[in-house]
Image (cartoon, rainbow, N blue to C red):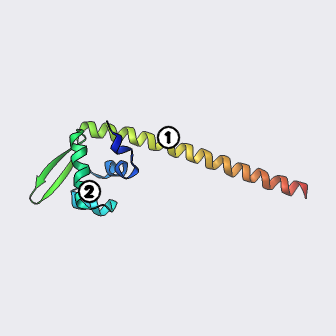
Amino acid sequence: MYRFIAQKRYVRLMFLINGKNIRQLSKEVDMTTSHISNVMDQFAKEGLIEKERKGREVEIKVTEKGKELIEILRKYEDLANKEIKKEEKEETGEKNEGKNKVLESS
């Protein structure tokens, strides 16, 4: 269902889209406006966003379903960051233990 969102750049878009237009988004994520437009069409098809035309621009609004997905993505991101920090801490601890052993054997 959300297979296309699994790509990192599309996850990033979900965090950025609310209240912006396609041109603004394309600058922020370095994608062409036509590519962003296609992605937004897919998001709209999934019920994650609504498009609202304001003159020549199309403003993007996140739906309740989109907000729920963003919340899930944030929780996942938080969990992933905690795991990364834990691994870094463990690696740092292992390096320090190695240094201490070298110093003790001197």
Q: Nearer the viewer, residue 59 or 11?
A: 11
Disc 1 element? helix
Q: What crowding class fits label 1: few (fewer than 14 Cα within 10 Å), some (14-19), or many (20 or more)?
A: few
Residue at 33% from the left image edge and 59% from the top image edge: 29
Residue at the (58%, 47%) spot, across then down: 85
Tell me residue 55's x, y (percent): 8, 58
> Which residue was labeled with disc 1?
79
Specify the amino acid type for callout 1: Leu
Residue at mark 2: 35
Give the Cα separation between the discs numbered 2 and 1: 30 Å
- Quarter of the image that includes the N terminus: top left
Q: Amino acid at mark 2?
A: His
The disc placed on residue 15 is: none
* Front label number (2 vs 1): 2
Q: Position of residue 16 (x, y in %)?
A: 31, 52
Residue name at image x 16 percent, y 48 percent: 51
Q: Between 100 and 7, which is closer to the camera in this rendering?
A: 7
85 and 14: which is toward the camera = 14
The one of 64 and 27 positioned closer to us in this rendering: 27
